[in-house]
Amino acid sequence: MRKPWHPMLTAILLPLLLLVLAPPVAAQQQGPQARIGTWTLTTVADWQAGAASGTMVTNNAGGELRLADGQASGSFISVPFKTDFAANAAGLLWEAELPPGTQLSLALRSRITPPEDAGEAGWSAWYQLESGNTRSATGGWASPHVVALPRGSEYLQLRVNLSSDVARASASLRQVSVSYLDSASTFPTFAAGLPRQPILFGPETLTQRPAVIARRDWSGRVAAAQPGRSDPLGVIVHQLDTTLTADASLELVRALLAYQTQVLGWEDLSYHYLIDPEGNLYEGRLGGPTSRVTQVAGGDRAVHVALLNPREEPLSPTAQSSLVSLLAWLGQAYDFAPTGQHSVGSAGGRTTRPNIAAHNEVVPTAPDPYGPVQNALPQLRTLADQSTVRARWYFAEGNVSDYSQRLSLFNPTNSPADARITLVRPGAAPVARIVDVAPGARSDLTINALVQDENALPAIVESSVALLAERSMGLTSDIGGGPGISRLSRVWYFAEGSTEGTNRTFLVLFNPNATSAQATVTYMRRDGTSLSQEVQIAGQDRLVITVGDITQPDGSMPLQGTNFGVQVIANQPIAAERTMRFGPGQTGMHTGRGIATLAREWHFAEGTTEGDFRMRLLVLNPNRHMANLEVSFMGPDGQQELRRYAVPPRTQLTIDANEVVPNLGVSTKLRSDRPVAVERSLHFNNGATGSVGAGATAPELRWAFVDGRTSDATYYLCVSNPGYLPADVTVDLRFSDGAIGSQRFRVPAGARYTMAVHEFYPDEAAVTAIVRATQPIVAERSLFPGGGARGGFTVLGLPLP
């Protein structure tokens, strides 16, 4: 009778069985491994066995190959060597003396089948291997990389060429070691099938991070010596002369890793990134672009990029695209211009070098990159510069079904620019346009002329020049707008929000990412109570939340007829805007971006309680502790009114400026002992029109205003000086016909000044303004179509460096 299997035996034997069957831990971590074999020529017999022409063999150092007496050139070809296993890559190490004026070159070829005779049939082409001043860890000359052999190669042959420009002088070759490698997989793996991820290293950039095949995914080897660190000054472009099939690239980079670390004895790959003919981008050296390479290019502070490309062929379009994207990102991440130069030290002093340099520009003895790639470098630098995104603006709100909508673009630089405008249509193909913007000029794009009847139309504006972008949205009864969002954020705040009376509040959340985003939206009311909702924004889509329509499971609508501030926290960066409609018949509107960063100090240059203007400050304290405020209202002549307030935790506070400083034009400064979000609202025309917007968290020396006009509109620039010294202010204005105007004025310490632009320059269809001062100031613009009869809005300028 069979005895039952005891559970205790399972507990004991199963781990032992798994241990026996499992591969070694090192193998699990190391991934596919390369076999390495060596063939060495060093003795007299080795050299005499080959075919020689114009060379001789001496007994020096046990066997040495050199030019024969009286010969200016000569060659040596070894007998074929049978490898221990089929190889797919090879590299060379050698020991030689090179007196001045002498040259030595080495080449290798292979075949799969045995050589039947001395004929050439069956042999590959000769692969040239040069050192470019590269040394192994033991000090010998070495090819810095391997050449790709036809998979299954089992026979190798070496060729040596010697030449001299000096009579009776010759290079002498003492030893050559051929390292042949087998990195081919039993079942070939295509690089295109491996996962990709954005480069992890480096600071945040506007230029998109390229997606790489991570080191662990193509080799499994993720252990490396701790590298030295330094920020790179540029890029050095290398070229590995090789002809590859689609499945051979992966095997070659694996062989290269084994050769440089196990044969040359280097601590890691000398290339930070590698690009194959299919455009696959491989992560090479571990540690990212700041990992210092000491073995090549004299230890230059550079990112080393290797191109796997045949010597006589240009880069494929996909390889060029990958290279350009990488160069553009590296330049922005480490602050070097793709078309610029930098200074480097050398034995002869300091010299300049292109920020993106060829290997042979850095090391004159290096042969690479070769002709077609070398000749393409100037164009590649230009393409990298043009591909660098130096400005990106997001506009979450977009609606040409209910509003007239226009984008205004200003180029403050001395370089011509093109703006790539993408109108995202969720569920449909985007609409794209290129708009040229001349240096120092403005260009406008009317969105209604491109798309009609779309009520969901977020926009993205990109440029390789630091363009500024504003959006204007209007009804026949009111107008709103302002700058776009220059940086996405996971957290957004709105101090103002209301569903009281005729007010309607819409939150517009735009997710330009490829993947869906989740967000928690918390509404914090004036009475200290709050309500949260979970939302999801599909990739490359937007979500509009009509706050007053939010319904609880019991059917109640808790955010009707109330005032609140808003906090949005998403699991990935998004853009957030708020649109409000109000007034009889919803005649009033304003729209604008959220606040991405809380602050302890807020400044507003514009503000008035004169006439029928109603001014309020909205303060949101999202903290879990009380915030204590000090608010200064500053008049045009420097007079001030000071008030103090306490804002309970997670509460919105409204400060009615009309009660504090009635019938006065004011600027405002708010200080808090905790970071808060602050906005100012201005309503007029008996509450039928108005504007809301955040203030500045700090004064600046220069401000820019892209949009504006004085034709059928009044235009005011308001400047406040919160400092302790008077500020001399210059306003430079640019008009649609290219004309330029300038005005100057002084603003006393603690005072404000309002410039009526329409009085100086009436009937201008387009006005762009740059405000600069001798002391840090705050500047805002107010625009009133029809003198305010058709509404108006006030917006903070864009700070300029």
Image: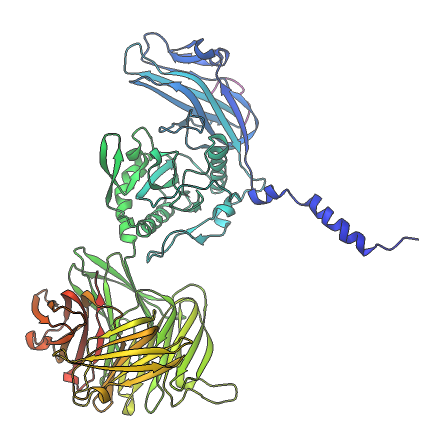
Q: Quadrant of residue 206?
A: bottom left
Q: Is residue 473 visible?
A: no
Q: Position of residue 137 (x, y in %)?
A: 44, 29
Image quarter in which the C terminus is found: bottom left
Q: Is residue 118 magenta?
A: yes
**Residue in the image at 38% along x and 85% along y:** 526
Q: Is residue 568 magenta?
A: no
Observer-nearest residue: 172 or 756? Answer: 756
**Residue sitting at x 49%, y 85%:** 552
Q: Quadrant of residue 60?
A: top left
Q: Is residue 207 above or below residue 273?
A: below
Indicate left or right for 541 with 667 as reference.
right
Magenta span covers which residues?
113-120
Locate residue 109, reporting x and y percent: 46, 26
Quarter of the view holding residue 100 = top left
Q: Residue furthest right?
A: 1
